[in-house]
Image (tube, rainbow, N blue to C red):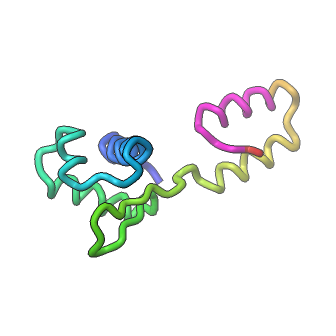
Amino acid sequence: MKLTKKQLAVLEFIEKFEEEKGYSPSYREIMAGLELSSVSAVAEHIDNLVRKGVLRKNSGEARSLEVLDYKHEKTVELFKTKMLVASEEEKTILEKAAEILGLDLA
């Protein structure tokens, strides 16, 4: 799954907003915060993110956006498998890469 720059910006905005306010933003707040052209542009991004499985929303409920874990479980499994057979140098590289990607290998 690959996200566009705008989709990633929408996700990051929602996450930051929720951290700061304790609830998810409205479409208008996303539009204003990201300087998007219209509420329908926000809705299109939201719908695409829901389809990609990185965002959940409850239909008919206001402020119900929920960012899901989009850090690929298969990627974590691959890293863990590679760590089992990696040399010390390779382990260091894998650990740095996992840190950059925000993967939890614990």
The image quadrant where one finds the C terminus is top right
Residue 52, visible in the rendered structure: yes
Question: From this viewpoint, which residue is outermost toward the front?
Answer: 21
Magenta region, mostly helix, strand or loop?
A: helix
What residue sits 87% from the left and 31% below the top?
87
Q: Position of residue 67 (x, y in %)?
A: 44, 55
What residue sits 65% from the left and 55% below the top?
74
What residue sits 36% from the left and 48% below the top?
14
Q: Position of residue 86 (x, y in %)?
A: 85, 36
Relative to 25, residue 91 above or below? above
Q: Is 94 on the left-hand or right-hand side of 85?
A: left
Question: From this viewpoint, which residue is outermost toward the bottom?
Answer: 60
Pick whichever, 47 or 13, lies toward us.
Answer: 13
Q: Position of residue 19 (x, y in %)?
A: 44, 44
What residue sits 22% from the left and 59% below the top?
43
Location of residue 60 (image quadrant)? bottom left
Q: Is 75 on the left-hand or right-hand side of 54?
A: right
Residue 92 magenta: yes
Pick whichever, 51 or 67, lies toward us.
Answer: 67
Which range is magenta?
91-104
Residue 4, visible in the rendered structure: no
Q: Is 93 on the left-hand or right-hand side of 49?
A: right
Q: Position of residue 65 (x, y in %)?
A: 36, 60
Relative to 35, residue 2 above or below? below
